[in-house]
Image: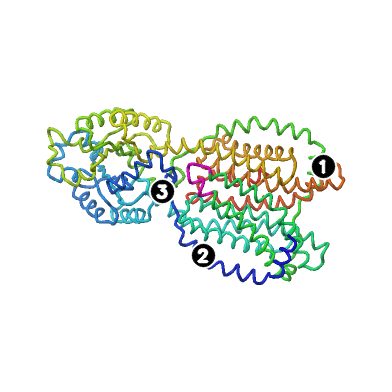
């Protein structure tokens, strides 16, 4: 390691030149990496809801779909608006009263069950179903959503998963940069106080900023990443790799006492930092890679990007940062000041004097912590974290108010299913509790309206060579126990008529999401704990220390998560896996730092109490500086509503990870 460190010091100028040049392809890769705003996209391909989406696209040429509510508009105005929307690129079809009848059949001749689908009780609201020829979160679909909103005016509302994705994208793009800047400023303020030079924090940020851009640029290889990954990765990488930067600088300052020459001091600091951060970075990487074992492939997306970010961060920490510090060594000295340091004497004495009581309290604390963590409430509804003023939220409210609808599901059954059985199926579906209507081609044909009078385009919309397409409306909101139970009943009814039939749509997919992620989170927890346990065992070469460290960190995670339960806060479903993995991976650095120093002092002949006091007193300022910096850094997520997967006010749990872990 020493030879490598000496090479870095010797080649510091070429390293800086190369690192600056690498920013160019990294930036190009970053701007050309697509961001995916559809959470349900990451469900496994082999489940029925995803297979049904493929059939809908392949057989019917339809991907995304939604509902348009028009309030207080005359029939002529509705028809005019419909014609405008039909001409928008990637709008495949629109189903409304006039499209079904072709304008040839009076409204009164339609069955009452069909009339109530398209008109509200007071007659002021008109409903249309819209289909796109592209998928839910495709760029073309979101562009079409924006254009539809522009042409349909303030009296119309478009409700769909694509609308939610569009609003999420707009919020992310408008807010992410601003709040990232706020995070950097807050982090700099903390570092200005806790380091002994005003320039050092800036150099930290330059080095870490380069590492973040390298990571974001290399995501181009994956083709696209989730907006949740995008929202977390920069802040997470900044928070985690900040530890390594602080450790390097503190090591450099210590080595200067032994080596007056800055180059010699830095080479020894690099060598010792590589050794010290190898174990901690490996445990962090292992924690993130454990997310790759999720069948919900958002975990794979996040795990790869975050683990890659830690690797790049470590490389930059031992190459780019030392080169920056040595290059600007004179400026660092000229901007030096007295650093804020904790008076650790009282803390260390208190811990060593009352360690038995503290250990007992820790054991007792497990009971409420585990209980709270096990009972914390989570939500899966995708638009719940969006502000109420957004068009997608307003459309959902209009749909519920005017038509008592909260979600629309699609049903695919065999085209060979006789019309009589299809009508019977529609009748049975409509009789499932909470279903407001079930609509299919056979709903509007019969004695009053012969099938010959139904326009061919409607027949093409609702049937193909192999499948019939039905629509089912629910009064229940997505991701509730009521709608999940309803989906199970609907699936049972569908299978009784056609064993190959399937229920697809947001409600069914979200039900699958709930089931899959609950299993995935347990798997990830076991794998991450096991992997980190083994790595700590290898790094510290002790059988008992890994047990103690994992127990302490797991207690911190349970305390962190249980805070939401006792405060009555509902968290997004992704919070538990993100926070648990992040906190386990991040705070294990602190644990390894302190236990490594403790072992060194024990080997030097100190007693256990004295060794703990020395380890605490020498480590606590580094940990304090890192943890406080990360807390202020991640606290910017309080205000970041859509770009962050955590709703307003719920982000405290992520920011608090370092505090509870500390």
Disc on the earlier residue, 1 or 3: 1
- Look at 37% across and 39% down and name the residue there: 49
Q: Which mark is residue 349?
A: 1
Instruction: Say whether marks 1 and 3 touch (CB < 8 Å).
Output: no
Residue 155: % across, % down? 29, 49
- Look at 83% across and 41% down and name the residue there: 608
Disc 2 element: helix
Which quadrant holds residue 605?
top right
* Residue 495 located within the stretch drawn in magenta: no
Q: Is residue 450 above or below residue 185?
A: above
Region of the chain picked out in magenta, as a range: 293-302
Which residue in the structure is indicated by mark 2?
27
- Look at 31% across and 39% down and name the residue there: 410
Q: Nearer the viewer, mark 3 or mark 2?
A: 2
Which residue in the structure is indicated by mark 3?
389
Q: What distance separates the C-alpha of mark 1 from that of mark 2?
A: 50 Å
* Residue 301 located within the stretch drawn in magenta: yes
Q: What distance separates the C-alpha of mark 1 from that of mark 3?
A: 54 Å
Quadrant (top left/top right/bottom left/bottom right) for the C terminus: top right
Please tell me which residue lies in front, 182 or 432. Answer: 432
Which quadrant holds residue 115?
top left
Disc 3 element: loop
């Amino acid at each position: 390691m020493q030879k490598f460190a000496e090479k870095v010091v010797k080649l510091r100028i070429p390293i800086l030149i190369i690192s600056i040049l690498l920013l160019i392809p990294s930036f190009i890769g970053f701007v050309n990496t697509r961001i995916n705003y559809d959470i349900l996209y990451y469900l496994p391909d082999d489940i029925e809801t995803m297979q049904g989406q493929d059939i809908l696209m392949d057989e019917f040429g339809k991907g995304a779909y939604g509902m348009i509510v028009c309030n207080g508009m005359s029939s002529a105005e509705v028809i005019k608006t419909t014609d405008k929307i039909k001409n928008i690129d990637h709008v495949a079809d629109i189903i409304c009263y006039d499209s079904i009848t072709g304008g040839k059949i009076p409204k009164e001749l339609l069955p009452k069950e069909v009339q109530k689908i398209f008109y509200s009780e007071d007659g002021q609201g008109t409903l249309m179903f819209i289909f796109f020829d592209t998928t839910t979160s495709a760029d073309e679909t979101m562009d079409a959503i924006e254009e539809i909103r522009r042409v349909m005016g303030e009296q119309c509302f478009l409700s769909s998963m694509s609308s939610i994705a569009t609003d999420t994208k707009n919020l992310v793009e408008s807010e992410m940069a601003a709040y990232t800047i706020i995070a950097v400023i807050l982090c700099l303020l903390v570092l200005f106080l806790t380091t002994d030079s005003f320039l050092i924090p800036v150099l930290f940020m330059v080095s870490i900023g380069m590492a973040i851009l390298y990571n974001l640029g290399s995501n181009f290889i994956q083709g696209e990443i989730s907006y949740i990954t995008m929202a977390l990765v920069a802040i997470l990488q900044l928070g985690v790799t900040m530890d390594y930067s602080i450790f390097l600088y503190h090591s450099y300052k210590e080595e200067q006492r032994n080596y007056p020459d800055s180059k010699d001091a830095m080479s020894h600091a690099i060598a010792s930092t590589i050794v010290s951060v190898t174990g901690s970075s490996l445990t962090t990487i292992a924690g993130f890679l454990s997310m790759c074992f999720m069948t919900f492939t958002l975990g794979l997306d996040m795990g790869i990007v975050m683990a890659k970010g830690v690797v790049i961060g470590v490389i930059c920490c031992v190459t780019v940062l030392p080169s920056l510090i040595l290059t600007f060594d004179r400026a660092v000295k000229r901007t030096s000041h007295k650093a804020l340091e904790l008076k650790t004497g009282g803390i260390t004495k208190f811990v060593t004097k009352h360690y038995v009581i503290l250990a007992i309290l820790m054991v007792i604390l497990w009971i409420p912590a585990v209980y709270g963590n096990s009972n914390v409430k989570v939500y899966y509804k995708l638009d719940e974290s969006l502000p109420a003023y957004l068009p997608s939220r307003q459309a959902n409210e209009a749909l519920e108010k005017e038509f008592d609808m909260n979600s629309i599901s699609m049903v695919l059954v065999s085209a060979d299913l006789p019309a009589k059985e299809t009508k019977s199926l529609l009748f049975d579906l409509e009789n499932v509790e909470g279903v407001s209507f079930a609509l299919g081609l056979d709903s509007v044909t019969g004695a009053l309206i012969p099938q010959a009078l139904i326009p061919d385009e409607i027949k093409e919309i609702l049937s193909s060579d192999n499948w019939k397409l039905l629509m089912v409306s629910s009064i229940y909101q997505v991701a509730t126990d009521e709608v999940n139970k309803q989906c199970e009943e609907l699936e049972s009814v569908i299978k009784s008529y056609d064993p190959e039939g399937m229920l697809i749509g947001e409600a069914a997919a979200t039900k699958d999401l709930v089931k899959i992620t609950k299993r995935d989170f347990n798997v990830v927890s076991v794998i991450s704990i096991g992997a980190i346990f083994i790595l700590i065992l290898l790094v510290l070469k002790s059988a008992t220390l890994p047990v103690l460290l994992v127990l302490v960190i797991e207690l911190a995670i349970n305390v962190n998560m249980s805070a939401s339960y006792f405060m009555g806060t509902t968290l997004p479903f992704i919070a538990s896996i993100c926070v648990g993995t992040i906190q386990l991976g991040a705070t294990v650095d602190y644990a390894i730092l302190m236990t490594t120093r403790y072992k060194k002092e024990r080997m030097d002949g100190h007693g256990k109490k004295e060794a703990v006091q020395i380890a605490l007193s020498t480590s606590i300022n580094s940990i304090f500086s890192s943890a406080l910096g990360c807390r202020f850094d991640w606290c910017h997520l309080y205000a970041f509503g859509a770009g962050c997967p955590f709703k307003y006010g719920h982000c405290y749990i992520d920011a608090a990870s370092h505090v509870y872990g500390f």
